[in-house]
Protein backbone atom coordinates (compact mmCIF):
# COMPACT_ATOMS: atom_id res chain seq x y z
CA UNK A 1 0.00 0.00 0.00
CA UNK A 2 1.38 3.42 -0.96
CA UNK A 3 1.99 5.81 1.89
CA UNK A 4 1.14 9.48 1.69
CA UNK A 5 1.97 12.26 4.12
CA UNK A 6 -0.54 15.11 4.13
CA UNK A 7 0.97 18.33 5.48
CA UNK A 8 -1.80 20.85 5.96
CA UNK A 9 -2.51 23.17 8.88
CA UNK A 10 -6.23 23.43 8.14
CA UNK A 11 -7.75 20.35 9.71
CA UNK A 12 -10.96 20.42 7.67
CA UNK A 13 -9.03 20.35 4.39
CA UNK A 14 -6.70 17.65 5.69
CA UNK A 15 -9.67 15.50 6.68
CA UNK A 16 -11.26 15.79 3.25
CA UNK A 17 -8.01 14.84 1.54
CA UNK A 18 -7.44 11.97 3.91
CA UNK A 19 -10.93 10.59 3.35
CA UNK A 20 -10.71 10.62 -0.43
CA UNK A 21 -7.20 9.13 -0.53
CA UNK A 22 -7.95 6.48 2.10
CA UNK A 23 -11.05 5.42 0.14
CA UNK A 24 -8.83 5.11 -2.93
CA UNK A 25 -6.58 2.65 -1.07
CA UNK A 26 -3.75 4.89 0.10
CA UNK A 27 -2.39 4.87 3.62
CA UNK A 28 -2.42 8.44 4.89
CA UNK A 29 -0.72 10.26 7.73
CA UNK A 30 -1.48 13.85 8.63
CA UNK A 31 0.87 16.51 9.97
CA UNK A 32 -0.47 19.94 10.89
CA UNK A 33 2.82 21.82 11.03
CA UNK A 34 6.19 21.80 9.33
CA UNK A 35 8.27 20.48 12.22
CA UNK A 36 5.95 17.56 12.89
CA UNK A 37 6.07 16.83 9.15
CA UNK A 38 9.88 16.83 9.15
CA UNK A 39 9.91 14.34 12.06
CA UNK A 40 7.46 12.06 10.29
CA UNK A 41 9.40 12.24 7.02
CA UNK A 42 12.62 11.32 8.75
CA UNK A 43 11.18 8.34 10.52
CA UNK A 44 8.75 6.79 8.05
CA UNK A 45 8.99 5.58 4.46
CA UNK A 46 6.51 7.71 2.52
CA UNK A 47 5.98 7.48 -1.23
CA UNK A 48 4.46 10.91 -1.62
CA UNK A 49 4.00 14.10 0.39
CA UNK A 50 1.22 16.58 -0.23
CA UNK A 51 2.61 19.87 1.00
CA UNK A 52 0.78 23.03 1.83
CA UNK A 53 3.21 25.95 1.41
CA UNK A 54 2.29 28.32 4.21
CA UNK A 55 2.66 26.31 7.39
CA UNK A 56 3.64 26.90 10.98
CA UNK A 57 7.11 25.59 11.87
CA UNK A 58 8.74 25.02 8.50
CA UNK A 59 7.20 26.00 5.17
CA UNK A 60 6.48 23.79 2.20
CA UNK A 61 9.64 24.79 0.34
CA UNK A 62 11.82 23.73 3.28
CA UNK A 63 9.96 20.44 3.52
CA UNK A 64 10.44 19.90 -0.20
CA UNK A 65 14.21 19.84 0.40
CA UNK A 66 13.71 17.11 2.98
CA UNK A 67 11.55 15.14 0.62
CA UNK A 68 14.05 15.43 -2.20
CA UNK A 69 16.87 14.08 -0.07
CA UNK A 70 14.63 11.16 0.93
CA UNK A 71 13.38 10.61 -2.64
CA UNK A 72 9.78 11.23 -1.68
CA UNK A 73 7.66 12.71 -4.47
CA UNK A 74 5.94 16.01 -3.70
CA UNK A 75 2.74 17.69 -4.81
CA UNK A 76 2.24 21.23 -3.55
CA UNK A 77 -1.27 22.20 -2.51
CA UNK A 78 -1.46 25.90 -2.01
CA UNK A 79 -3.64 28.95 -2.00
CA UNK A 80 -0.63 30.70 -3.50
CA UNK A 81 -1.84 29.90 -6.96
CA UNK A 82 -0.16 32.65 -8.92
CA UNK A 83 1.90 31.61 -11.88
CA UNK A 84 5.18 32.59 -10.22
CA UNK A 85 4.35 30.46 -7.18
CA UNK A 86 3.61 27.44 -9.33
CA UNK A 87 6.76 27.95 -11.33
CA UNK A 88 8.81 28.30 -8.15
CA UNK A 89 7.32 25.10 -6.75
CA UNK A 90 7.92 23.10 -9.90
CA UNK A 91 11.39 24.48 -10.44
CA UNK A 92 12.27 23.61 -6.86
CA UNK A 93 11.54 19.98 -7.71
CA UNK A 94 7.88 19.30 -6.92
CA UNK A 95 6.22 16.77 -9.22
CA UNK A 96 3.03 18.78 -9.42
CA UNK A 97 1.29 21.86 -8.06
CA UNK A 98 -2.40 22.13 -7.32
CA UNK A 99 -3.81 25.55 -6.45
CA UNK A 100 -6.51 25.77 -3.81
CA UNK A 101 -9.39 25.40 -3.96
CA UNK A 102 -9.21 22.17 -5.91
CA UNK A 103 -11.68 19.42 -6.69
CA UNK A 104 -11.00 16.18 -4.82
CA UNK A 105 -11.28 13.96 -7.92
CA UNK A 106 -8.61 16.11 -9.54
CA UNK A 107 -6.36 15.71 -6.52
CA UNK A 108 -6.82 11.94 -6.66
CA UNK A 109 -6.04 11.85 -10.38
CA UNK A 110 -2.87 13.84 -9.84
CA UNK A 111 -1.76 11.64 -6.94
CA UNK A 112 -2.29 8.51 -9.04
CA UNK A 113 -0.37 10.04 -11.94
CA UNK A 114 2.60 11.20 -9.89
CA UNK A 115 2.95 7.84 -8.16
CA UNK A 116 2.73 6.00 -11.45
CA UNK A 117 5.32 8.30 -13.00
CA UNK A 118 7.64 7.67 -10.06
CA UNK A 119 7.24 3.92 -10.51
CA UNK A 120 5.16 3.71 -7.35
CA UNK A 121 1.69 3.32 -8.75
CA UNK A 122 -0.58 0.32 -9.13
CA UNK A 123 1.48 -2.00 -7.00
CA UNK A 124 4.70 -1.66 -9.01
CA UNK A 125 7.81 -1.04 -6.94
CA UNK A 126 10.94 -0.15 -8.82
CA UNK A 127 14.18 -1.57 -7.43
CA UNK A 128 16.52 -0.51 -10.23
CA UNK A 129 16.28 0.54 -13.86
CA UNK A 130 15.69 -3.04 -14.98
CA UNK A 131 14.24 -4.60 -11.81
CA UNK A 132 10.69 -4.17 -10.61
CA UNK A 133 8.33 -5.83 -8.19
CA UNK A 134 4.67 -6.28 -8.98
CA UNK A 135 3.32 -6.40 -5.45
CA UNK A 136 -0.21 -7.27 -6.60
CA UNK A 137 1.02 -10.58 -8.02
CA UNK A 138 4.20 -11.11 -5.98
CA UNK A 139 6.29 -11.20 -9.15
CA UNK A 140 9.81 -9.84 -9.50
CA UNK A 141 11.10 -9.13 -12.97
CA UNK A 142 14.59 -8.35 -14.15
CA UNK A 143 14.84 -6.99 -17.67
CA UNK A 144 11.23 -8.08 -18.18
CA UNK A 145 11.80 -11.69 -17.10
CA UNK A 146 10.45 -13.18 -13.88
CA UNK A 147 13.04 -14.12 -11.26
CA UNK A 148 12.20 -16.89 -8.80
CA UNK A 149 12.66 -15.81 -5.20
CA UNK A 150 11.75 -17.57 -1.98
CA UNK A 151 9.10 -15.89 0.18
CA UNK A 152 11.73 -14.46 2.53
CA UNK A 153 13.89 -13.21 -0.33
CA UNK A 154 10.84 -11.54 -1.83
CA UNK A 155 9.92 -9.86 1.47
CA UNK A 156 13.51 -8.66 1.87
CA UNK A 157 13.52 -7.16 -1.61
CA UNK A 158 10.24 -5.33 -0.97
CA UNK A 159 11.61 -3.97 2.31
CA UNK A 160 14.73 -2.62 0.58
CA UNK A 161 12.73 -1.26 -2.35
CA UNK A 162 10.50 0.65 0.06
CA UNK A 163 13.53 2.09 1.85
CA UNK A 164 16.07 3.06 -0.79
CA UNK A 165 19.24 4.84 0.32
CA UNK A 166 18.53 4.10 3.95
CA UNK A 167 20.72 1.85 6.06
CA UNK A 168 18.47 -0.90 7.38
CA UNK A 169 19.74 -2.46 10.59
CA UNK A 170 19.91 -6.24 10.71
CA UNK A 171 17.64 -6.12 13.73
CA UNK A 172 14.95 -4.20 11.89
CA UNK A 173 15.29 -6.37 8.79
CA UNK A 174 14.89 -9.52 10.86
CA UNK A 175 11.92 -8.24 12.79
CA UNK A 176 10.14 -6.98 9.67
CA UNK A 177 10.74 -10.03 7.49
CA UNK A 178 10.76 -12.85 9.99
CA UNK A 179 8.25 -11.24 12.34
CA UNK A 180 10.21 -12.32 15.38
CA UNK A 181 12.41 -10.59 17.93
CA UNK A 182 16.02 -10.44 16.77
CA UNK A 183 18.30 -12.34 19.12
CA UNK A 184 21.56 -11.47 17.44
CA UNK A 185 21.88 -14.25 14.88
CA UNK A 186 22.99 -12.15 11.93
CA UNK A 187 23.74 -15.15 9.72
CA UNK A 188 20.10 -15.73 8.85
CA UNK A 189 19.69 -12.21 7.52
CA UNK A 190 23.08 -12.24 5.77
CA UNK A 191 22.44 -15.56 4.07
CA UNK A 192 19.07 -14.53 2.67
CA UNK A 193 20.20 -11.07 1.60
CA UNK A 194 23.23 -12.52 -0.15
CA UNK A 195 21.21 -15.13 -2.03
CA UNK A 196 18.56 -12.62 -3.11
CA UNK A 197 21.20 -10.10 -4.15
CA UNK A 198 23.01 -12.68 -6.26
CA UNK A 199 19.87 -13.84 -8.05
CA UNK A 200 19.13 -10.26 -9.08
CA UNK A 201 22.68 -9.13 -9.73
CA UNK A 202 22.38 -6.45 -7.05
CA UNK A 203 25.81 -7.02 -5.50
CA UNK A 204 26.97 -3.52 -6.38
CA UNK A 205 23.81 -1.72 -5.30
CA UNK A 206 22.71 -3.62 -2.21
CA UNK A 207 25.69 -3.20 0.02
CA UNK A 208 26.58 -4.40 3.50
CA UNK A 209 27.29 -1.67 6.02
CA UNK A 210 29.92 -3.04 8.33
CA UNK A 211 28.46 -4.22 11.65
CA UNK A 212 25.15 -2.48 10.99
CA UNK A 213 23.11 -3.87 8.13
CA UNK A 214 22.42 -3.18 4.48
CA UNK A 215 21.56 -0.34 2.17
CA UNK A 216 20.03 -0.38 -1.29
CA UNK A 217 21.32 2.45 -3.46
CA UNK A 218 18.30 4.02 -5.12
CA1 LIG B 1 -1.61 26.80 5.26
Image (cartoon, rainbow, N blue to C red):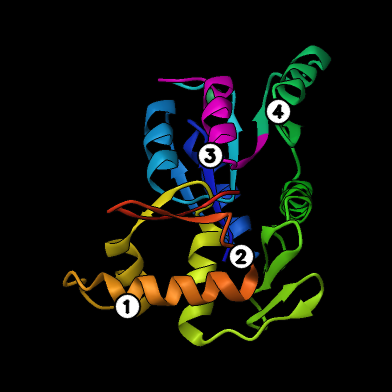
Which one is nearer the viewer's eye here, 83 or 69?
Answer: 69
Q: Which region of the structure is painted magenta?
A: 57-75
Closer to the observer: label 1 or label 2?
Answer: 1
Closer to the observer: label 4 or label 3?
Answer: 3
Percent across and percent down for residue 216 are 52, 54
Q: Which residue is mark 1?
A: 188
Q: Which residue is mark 4?
A: 93
First reached walking from the N terminus: tag 1 or tag 2: 2
Which one is nearer the viewer's eye here, 71 or 209?
Answer: 209
Asked if residue 184 lies left or right of residue 151, the reply is left
Magenta span contains residue 188? no
* Element carrying mark 1: helix
Which one is nearer the viewer's eye here, 149 or 187?
Answer: 187
Separation (CA) of disc 4 from disc 3: 13 Å
Asked if residue 178 lies left or right of residue 23, the reply is left
Question: For the point 73% across and 75% down, which residue is it?
Answer: 141
Amino acid sequence: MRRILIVEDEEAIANLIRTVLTDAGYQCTWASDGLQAADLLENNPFDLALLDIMLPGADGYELLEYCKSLEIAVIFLSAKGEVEDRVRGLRAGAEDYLPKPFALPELLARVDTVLRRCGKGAGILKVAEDIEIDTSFHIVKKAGRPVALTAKEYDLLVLFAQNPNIVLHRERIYERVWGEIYLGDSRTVDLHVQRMRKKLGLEERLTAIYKVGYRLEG
